[in-house]
């Protein structure tokens, strides 16, 4: 009846709707491109073009000490791959990422499980747990640098009061210090993600497990962990990406030292560009980092997008 009413000439004459205009429609393909055009333009200007410009710079000898730019091919890549400092930075970055991500996930999961119940003072505990994540990483590094100063720092003074004269910036202790600082600041991040996931789990499963005689640890092992797999992976992925590009807190606290012990890939690129002045070498190192990360993208995307309940 609706179709007949619309095709009625009397209705057309009253509403003044031309027949051709009524039947004309925008193709679906055009609608998709029109709606996605702003995002595509943004990505092109701020992502695609800088990548190609960086590729070009990596093939030149551009430096802060000279105005002319010459094409030198893959010489910058050879310089990076033969630089021991690059491999040291790569090893430290991978080690730092794996260790901190694992510790942050474990501590965040434990705190989320403990907080996933009713108890007095829960709001105050949440406020206390979220305080570190509200501090900028550079400010956190500066605070710890002052607190750990061997001459005027609070923590070394307390250790000396108990007869312990330990330098926390010793080459054997500084990496542990950075890991502790990373875990302290970013555990609230994973805690929030995991706690939100725990809140979404059906309570009926745990009630049935309790009736069947399952203990708390068994319920966590056989119910919580399998159901929280996608959430844990997403939290770990986000933290790993952030840890891979860590710069500010390490640079403020140690400057990449002593020597090159705590030099991450981001600090290596920064020093090459703004201290050594070799923009071409710095861009070559950045491109190599990108090439290292690209093969991981399909695996990660497939793991995040493919959900167990979406499989038929």
Image (spheres, rainbow, N blue to C red):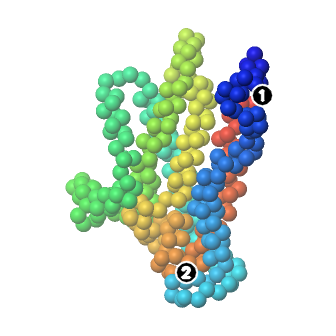
Mark 1 sits on what residue? 312
Q: Is residue 230 visible?
A: yes
Q: Nearer the viewer, residue 202 or 4?
A: 4
Residue that mark 2 sits on: 278
Residue 203: where, in percent of width, then height? Answer: 53, 18
Tell me the quarter of the picture where residue 178 sits. Answer: bottom left
Give the residue at x 47% y 62%: 247
Q: Position of residue 127 (x, y in %)?
A: 33, 37
Circle 2: element type? loop
**Label 1, residues with CA under 10 Å away: few <14, some 14-19, many ≥20:** few
| Residue in view at x 40 percent, y 53 percent | 181
* Front residue of 246 and 172: 246
Q: Is residue 179 above or below residue 288?
A: above
18 relative to 246 in the view: left or right: right
What residue is at 72 percent from the left and 23 percent from the top?
10
Quadrant for residue 87, please give it. Answer: bottom right
* 115, 281: nearer the viewer: 281
């Amino acid at each position: 009846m609706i179709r007949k009413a619309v095709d009625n000439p009397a209705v057309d004459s009253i509403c003044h709707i031309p027949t051709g205009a009524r039947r004309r429609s925008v193709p679906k393909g055009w609608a998709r491109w029109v709606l996605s055009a702003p995002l595509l333009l943004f990505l092109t200007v701020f992502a695609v073009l800088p990548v190609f410009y960086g590729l070009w710079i990596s093939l030149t000898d551009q430096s802060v000490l000279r105005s002319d730019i010459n094409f030198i091919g893959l010489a910058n890549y050879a310089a990076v791959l033969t630089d021991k400092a690059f491999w040291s930075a790569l090893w430290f970055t991978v080690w730092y990422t794996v260790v901190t991500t694992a510790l942050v996930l474990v501590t965040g999961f434990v705190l989320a499980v403990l907080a996933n119940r009713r108890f007095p003072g829960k709001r105050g505990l949440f406020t206390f747990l979220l305080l570190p994540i509200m501090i900028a990483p550079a400010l956190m590094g500066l605070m710890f640098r002052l607190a750990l100063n061997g001459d005027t720092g609070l923590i070394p003074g307390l250790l000396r009061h108990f007869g312990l004269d330990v330098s926390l910036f010793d080459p054997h202790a500084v990496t542990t210090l950075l890991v502790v600082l990373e875990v302290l600041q970013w555990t609230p991040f994973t805690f929030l993600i995991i706690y939100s996931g725990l809140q979404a789990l059906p309570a009926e499963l745990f009630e049935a497990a309790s009736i069947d005689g399952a203990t708390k640890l068994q319920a966590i092992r056989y119910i919580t962990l399998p159901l929280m797999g996608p959430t844990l992976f997403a939290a770990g992925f986000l933290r790993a990406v952030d840890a891979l590009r860590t710069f500010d807190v390490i640079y403020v606290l140690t400057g990449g030292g002593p020597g090159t012990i705590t030099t991450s890939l981001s600090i290596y690129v920064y020093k090459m560009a703004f201290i050594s002045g070799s923009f071409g070498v710095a861009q070559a190192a950045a491109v190599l980092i990108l090439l290292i990360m690209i093969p991981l993208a399909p695996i990660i995307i497939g793991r995040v997008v493919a959900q167990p309940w979406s499989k038929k």
